[in-house]
Image: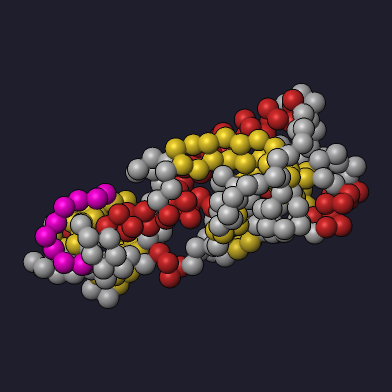
Amino acid sequence: MEAGFEVVLVVSQPDKKRGRGGQLSPSPVKAAALELGLPVTDRVDDVLDTGADLGVVVAYGKLIKPHVLDRVPMVNLHFSLLPRWRGAAPVERALLAGDAETGVDLMELEEGLDTGGVYAEARLAIGPEETADELRERLVAVGTDLLVTNLTAGLGKPRPQEGEPTYASKIDPTELELRWERPAVELHRLVRLGRAWTTFRGKRLKVLAARLAATDGGPGELDGSVVGTGDGGLELIVVQPEGKGPQEAPAWRHGARPEAGERVG
């Protein structure tokens, strides 16, 4: 930690079953805290007895109740330019909407969903091929600097959010299906989330990487590695057939040997 800051308690989600074995495993935050020798709990109310001056919240995933906020003021690092994309999936929703930029807001935590005033903000352009994981990594780095700089200098008074709110609901698995009648540019954004899928010969085929391409094929029609869409084409780069590991699209085609005009989806 920076000089002048002391972590008195880390609150993380309870251990969950992870992996094929289904064994209980700690969250990455809890694992890192334990490695550093920091005290950890999964009960938010435990902060009430710590004497903490301030709580810092990052992607916690739950609303913190008023009786806790009354005792321990808290700030939140939120990965959007509020009030745009309040809620659970701001990075994913910004990509799906085709936003040209996003950012990090250091904000005052209130009982409402991402409604508090903003202490400081950093803006980032979204790259045309950037994935959700790549963008989130950049936001974490920028957000960390924003947090430390403002805690060191003093938070001051937050400014109210201005503009019409939009809400970033969690991504439902059904939203990740590639529906080939949609425009290629929309499907490309979906692939950049990292979990997009279609089907081939009745089995699921994940599309892990793709790029925009030209084609004369109809929606879902394969032309080499390019799939036709409702407007343009999407070239498959990395796919993962059901029950197998990720592989380059040419290797998948070599094994699957799709017939001329065969379709996915």
Side of 244 where 20 appears, left or right: right
- Front-most of residues 158 and 62: 158
Q: Give the x, y percent position of residue 81.
A: 56, 44
At x 70% / y 40%, what residue is drawn? Answer: 159
Q: Is residue 176 above or below residue 59?
A: below
Where is the C terminus found, in terms of image quarters?
bottom left
Q: Give the x, y percent position of residue 116.
A: 71, 49
At x 35% / y 43%, what residue is drawn? Answer: 128
At x 47% / y 51%, what residue is drawn? Answer: 94
- Front-most of residues 195 and 219: 219
Please state the extent of the stretch shown in magenta in the rendering: 211-219
Q: Is residue 35 above or below residue 187?
A: above
Side of 175 where 214 appears, left or right: left
Regarding residue 106, the answer to whether it shows in the image is yes
Q: Quadrant of residue 231?
A: bottom left
- Front-most of residues 40 and 134: 134
At x 74% / y 25%, what residue is drawn? Answer: 153
**Which residue is farthest left?**
260
Where is the N terminus found, in terms of image quarters?
top right
Q: Give the x, y percent position of residue 215.
A: 14, 56
